[in-house]
Amino acid sequence: MPDSRFKVLTSASTSGPGDAGRTGSWRVERPIIDYSRCTPAKTGKASCHLCWLYCPDNVVSKTLEPKIDLEYCKGCGICAEECPVKAIEMVSEEQFVKGGEDE
């Protein structure tokens, strides 16, 4: 029987995209995924997903072709650093602003 003097406290909240807020215009680099190198995308099997596991903002999807929610991505580069096959490259945000391209 548990000691009635102690109460177990737990949190009912769960993390999700945007916990730290939208990125805005201050991100310096953004991650770009090369699906020809990405293990889950290449094999069609739910494998690896280290980008999803290590993302501190929880913005990488755990799908066969992982997607990164750039609206909330802070550009920290952890996903690129942890990718064992180097399928994620950090690219200067400036080239997307000047080129008018966006994902």
Image: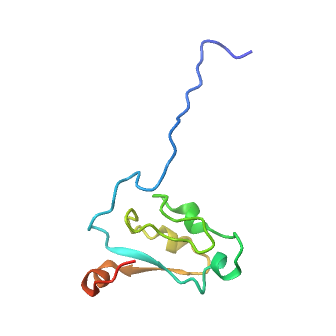
Q: How far across and how far down the image is residue 88, in percent?
A: 51, 78
Residue 100, above or below 18: below
Q: Nearer the viewer, residue 49 or 100?
A: 100
Q: Who's the residue at 40% across and 55% down the image?
A: 18
Which quarter of the picture shows residue 28?
A: bottom left
Q: How far across and how far down the image is residue 19, in percent?
A: 41, 51
Q: Who's the residue at 56% across and 64% down the image?
A: 52
Which quarter of the picture shows residue 30?
A: bottom left
Q: Is residue 100 left or right of 90 when viewed as pictured?
A: left
- Pick the quarter of the image with the C terminus: bottom left
Residue 51, above or below 37: above
Q: How far across and how far down the image is residue 14, in percent?
A: 52, 44
- Pick the quarter of the image with the N terminus: top right
Q: Number of labelled discs?
A: 0
Residue 59, above or below 95: above
Q: How far across and how far down the image is residue 2, in percent?
A: 70, 17
Q: Who's the residue at 35% across and 54% down the image?
A: 21
